[in-house]
Amino acid sequence: MASQHPIPFNNTFARMPDYFYSLQAPTAVSTPESLAINHDLAITLGIDPDWLASPEGIATVAGNYLPAGAEPLASVYAGHQFGSYNPQLGDGRAILLGEVSTASGHRYDIQLKGSGPTPYSRGGDGRSPLGPVLREYIVSEAMFALGVPTTRALAAVTTGDQVVRETLQPGAVLARVASSHLRVGTFQYFSAQKNVDALRSLVGYTLQRHFPDALNSGNDAQALLRCVIKAQAELIAHWQLLGFVHGVMNTDNMLLCGETVDYGPCAFMESFHPDTVFSSIDQGRRYAYRNQPGIAQWNLACLAQAVLPVLADNEEAAVAIAQEAVDQFPGLFMEAHNRGLSRKLGLIEATDEDTALIEDLFSLMAEAKADFTLTFRHLADLAAPDSDSAKVGKIYTPPQSLAPWLARWQERLAADDVSPADRQQSMYRANPVFIPRNHLVAQAISAAEDGDLEPFHTLIARTAQPFTYDEADQPLATPAQADEEVRQTFCGT
Ligand code: AMP
Ligand code: MG
């Protein structure tokens, strides 16, 4: 028998003033069928996975059924897209069903992506093709397993309807979960509207929801700005440490809670090069790997600008507070990046004296086009070469040019009082061996388009354990062969 409250909704955003959103139900689809159900995440959210996999659960994800307590709405926001301001974007193909709060007190949005038009669709169909839904499912769940703050995938369904893009494609819907979908662009929208009441209530709401420890500092807007800047500095450092290129770091794609969002043209680098860009639409290379920290700071300056009216009573004081907060970004980023790099290199703490060692590694990797992920994993193997862990030697040979560097690194390791076995274990936890490589994602999507979901499920299962190598899964850890390489990705909206 169907439960009366299969999703334990407990909504707060729907209690905010109505100018924050438009009430909007999903538009039903023809014949929903399950692609994937995230069992563990369902349990975390207090949802019975068996219900989610039942016809009623699938109908819910498809937008064909509204469980009790859902208050579907589309939120409004603005944003700088590739540097140009768009005064009104909003959830054009996403609908917030509602929120749940877990036993541990954490609150999550449950959103349907691809669930039909909203007042913010701007001529779009509000739909999503199968490919982008599977890509987001794979990559967001891999990011979670890698320990990166991220939105997650609760479930995905096909709709039975075709979506018109350059070609006709099968339609799909993703149920996405985030600590909230409030973004830099949400503040920008209300700031441009000169709606100071909205800015004030949004500051209070966001601080209470995401950074409650920072309440009662005497200046909520300043506290929020500082918290978001710190969370983003840590997030971007995490991306850099994994060779992750987001691809579309518009201000509407930067969440205030500090989770990665919008898995459009994103990709993990294989051959390392700092100028790497995958997105087909990023002609100016604005969102290249090496630019990500600078772009994040630029976006955060937009946030600071947007909250100026509520930072202080007069503009001069507000600008000073905003500037002080934004200026913290480079230091916070460097600190997080350095901490992560120390772990990746097996050092207790990389100091200024290690700068040359680190820079030389990246230069050598770039020159040799070395695989980012396996180069670091190989270092972990070398930390205790005789240990009985499975090593990547069969799928990775370090470039010859790295040999002198490896000797310098080994010498540096000797200065730290850590046993090789402990160092190796800690390095294994910082250097994944399984990432969703682009060609594997592409293969999984194309098989699914032909009705074979097995590669998709295999990839999800393997990338859920990114730090543990098993030679049986060697093909899933191996870089693309020249003829498999995917150099360009598409938003696929
Ligand atoms: P994105 O590039 O995914 O961040 O999307 C930018 C804006 O375009 C957001 O407001 C989306 O909701 C909207 N959008 C993207 N694709 C569609 C679509 N197929 N239908 C309606 N709106 C869309
Ligand atoms: Mg977006």
Image (tube, rainbow, N blue to C red):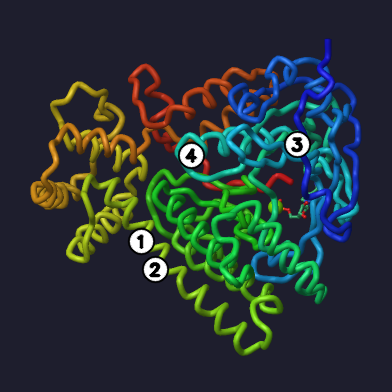
Please provide percent x and percent y for residue 436: 49, 35
- Inspect the image, locate mark 1, and give the three-letter code of the amino acid beneath it: Glu
Height in image: 270 above or below 153? Answer: below
Describe residue 384's horizontal placement relative to residue 131 as left or right: left
User: Which numbered dot is residue 129?
Assistant: 3
Badge 1 local density, few (<14 within 10 Å), some, or many (20+)? some
Q: Which residue is mark 4?
A: 485
Quadrant location, the N terminus: top right
Height in image: 412 above or below 314? Answer: above
Badge 2 local density, few (<14 within 10 Å), some, or many (20+)? few
Q: What residue is shown at x 88% (from left), y 27% (from top)? A: 65
Height in image: 356 above or below 115? Answer: below
User: Which numbered dot is residue 331?
Assistant: 2
Circles 1, 2 touching at the beta carbon (< 8 Å): yes
How far, Cα to Cα, is label 3 from label 1? 40 Å
How far, Cα to Cα, is label 4 from label 1? 34 Å
How far, Cα to Cα, is label 3 from label 2? 40 Å
Q: What residue is shown at x 72% (from left), y 68% (from top)? A: 188
Q: Secondary structure at mark 3?
A: strand
User: Which numbered dot is residue 335?
Assistant: 1
How far, Cα to Cα, is label 4 from label 3? 23 Å
- Inspect the image, locate mark 2, and give the three-letter code of the amino acid beneath it: Gly
User: Which numbered dot is residue 23?
Assistant: none
Q: Secondary structure at mark 1?
A: helix
Which tag is nearer the camera, tag 3 or tag 2? 2
